[in-house]
Image: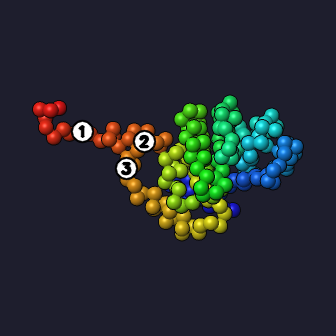
Amino acid sequence: MSDIIKNGRVHADEWTVLRLAEGANVDEAATVALPPGRVIVPLAVWQARRSELLAKAEAGVLGVWLAGNEDPAALADDLLRLQLVAIDFPKFADGRGYSIATLLRTRHGYTGELRAIGDVLRDQFFFLLRCGFSVLQPREGRYTPAQLEAALASLRDFSQPYQGAVDRPEPLFRRQPRNPLNKEAA
């Protein structure tokens, strides 16, 4: 069982991420066996078996994950039914997940759990949260619990982000009261 960061704390994860074999086809997505318990399925499985999986999603025991090359609009009609959407980061240098998260939160109005999965590194945690992720799930075994606790402490290094983002839309200069130096010029 892997550890996740959720609500500012380290937790044991209750979810299993289902991954298909590289180059899997539609038939495999339609017939793959789902593991027991809470499971996060790829978009291809959701699309192939939506009617079958809908009740599990509405019960909160099934989520869907998107790859970096998949359009979040593919889930737009189902976002109210999905309590968990995950975005896969296949490698450190792939930043498409940041854009997908921002689109889900802003354009599509998704308010449920948004999880970063895959090659999620400590150096990215702060920026992932700024883009709207609510849960960070590094690869299993990547960090010890002590390393995750240290990463949590480092999230407080920035008390006031300057730029606006999903987590704080107003930039710092709009959040700070303005006191003109010269009252006559004001």
Are dots 1 and 3 in contact, CB under 8 Å?
no
Q: Using the numbered discs, state the Cα–Cα distance from disc 2 to disc 1 in whole angstroms.
A: 18 Å
Q: Residues within 10 Å of mark 1 (few under 14, many from 20)?
A: few
Residue 29 position, x and y percent, is 83, 45
Foreground pick, 57 / 104: 104
Residue 44 position, x and y percent, is 77, 42
Foreground pick, 68 / 106: 68
Residue at the spot x=54%, y=64% of the render? 148
| SS category of the residue bearing label 3 | loop
Q: Kindly identify the amino acid type of the residue bearing the numbered disc 1.
A: Arg
Q: Which residue matches tag 1?
A: 178
If you read the primary sequence from the N terminus, does the residue marked by circle 2 or circle 1 appear first?
A: 2
Task: Assign the C terminus to one quadrant of the image.
Answer: top left
Q: Which residue matches tag 2?
A: 164
Q: Kindly identify the amino acid type of the residue bearing the numbered disc 3.
A: Gln
Residue 160's tag is: 3
| SS category of the residue bearing label 1 | loop
